[in-house]
Image: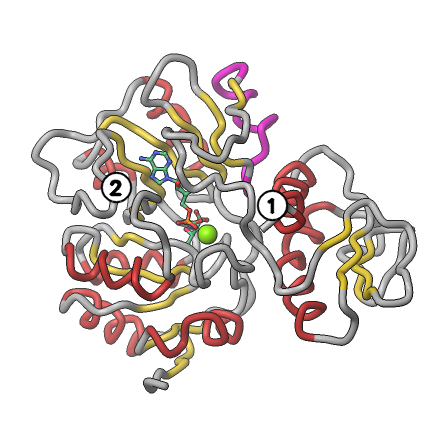
Amino acid sequence: MRKYSIRPGNIKSIKEAAVLLKTGKLVSFPTETVYGLGGDATNSFAVAAIFKAKKRPSFNPLICHLENTESAIEFAQFSETAKTLASYFWPGPLTLVLPSRSHNSISSLATAGLKTVALRVPENSIARQIIAEARCPIAAPSANRSGRISPTTAAAAAAELGSECPLIIDGGPCRVGLESTIIDLSIGRPSMLRPGGITREEIESKIGPLVTIRQTNSLPSSPGQLASHYAPEKPVRLKAVKALNNETMLGFGQISGDLNLSWNGDLNEAAANFFEYLRTLDNGPGEIIAVAPIPEKGLGIAINDRLRRAAAKR
Ligand code: TXA
Ligand code: MG
């Protein structure tokens, strides 16, 4: 196994991360959603290394992370709707799929050859400083092997991909705990490709009704929305009220378990705990993970999206 180091996020480690990124190496760093595995999006060798490290199918494009809206506008065409969403939600857990500008420097490997590009300006200060120091768009999928549970701590990122990544910057647990919401503004009416850290209600309050793209296994506009994803090693049983003999249980609110996502039924707290608790139960005793029902509202919609994929046939 190759060596890697986990370093606390400070000026020194951030500069070191930027040097690695500028020379085509990969760095794992915290964002407010999940830990990312970052590489220079303009360097095809770095982007290829991301796909290889994650064992990710190369038809599944990556999100490019920018320091601010001004730099994002260099890479994509922003409609008025895009500008509105950026002004309300960037920096923050929102990704916009937009028509690429011709001649932009982002590797076509990162966009999987599409004419669109997924852009996001993260809010986490370590992420922002790394992007600013590296002075390039950073392609960063979640720092897990493809299809597995996303990491929300540096230790989880190390367990997933440490051997593939020389440096992991530790910024503590992620504030939101679920990936960014992805909104496609590249064709027709704005649509939601992935529920995430910004709720549908928040987005619709700014731009009106969104179209929801229904899940299929071969959706060309969002190849990442595969039916089985975010999956622990163990099978998952949903909407459980009590653990059976061979199960450990992830509780929520009144329905207790071996771990409880939020005793007082707070969906934001549940989101922040979700991936880490799933990982803990996956590494513990029991053959199956039973999960209490999660209300289908607010961040519960994004949690249920991850749970359905975690429980899907593999
Ligand atoms: O919160 C997040 O978004 C995290 C952190 C690290 O920023 N990143 C993340 O990346 O979740 P990843 O690679 O796990 O998910 C990227 C998603 C995939 O579902 C992919 O298909 C979609 O974005 N995507 C990327 N480019 C796209 C495009 N041009 N059109 C449609 N979907 C796109
Ligand atoms: Mg992911």
The magenta-colored residue range is 196-209
- Mark number for residue 116? none
**Vertical relation: 209 (above or below) 115:** above
Q: Residue at x 52, y 59 (%)?
A: 148
Q: Does label 2 point to a residue whose CB lies under 8 Å from ligand 1?
A: yes
Nearer to us in this view, 103 or 45: 45
| Residue 85 coordinates in the image, percent (x, y) | 41, 28
Pointer 2: what residue?
A: 112
Q: Secondary structure at mark 1?
A: helix
Image colouring: secondary structure
297 vs 127, left or right, is right
| Residue 159 coordinates in the image, percent (x, y) | 50, 75
281 vs 192, left or right, is right
The amino acid beneath tag 1 is Arg
Give the total of numbered labels.
Answer: 2
Mark 2 is surrounded, within 10 Å at the Cα level, by few (under 14), some (14 to 19) or many (20 or more) other residues, namely some
Q: Residue furthest front?
A: 314
Q: Secondary structure at mark 2?
A: loop
Pointer 1: what residue?
A: 309
Membership of 204 in magenta stretch: yes
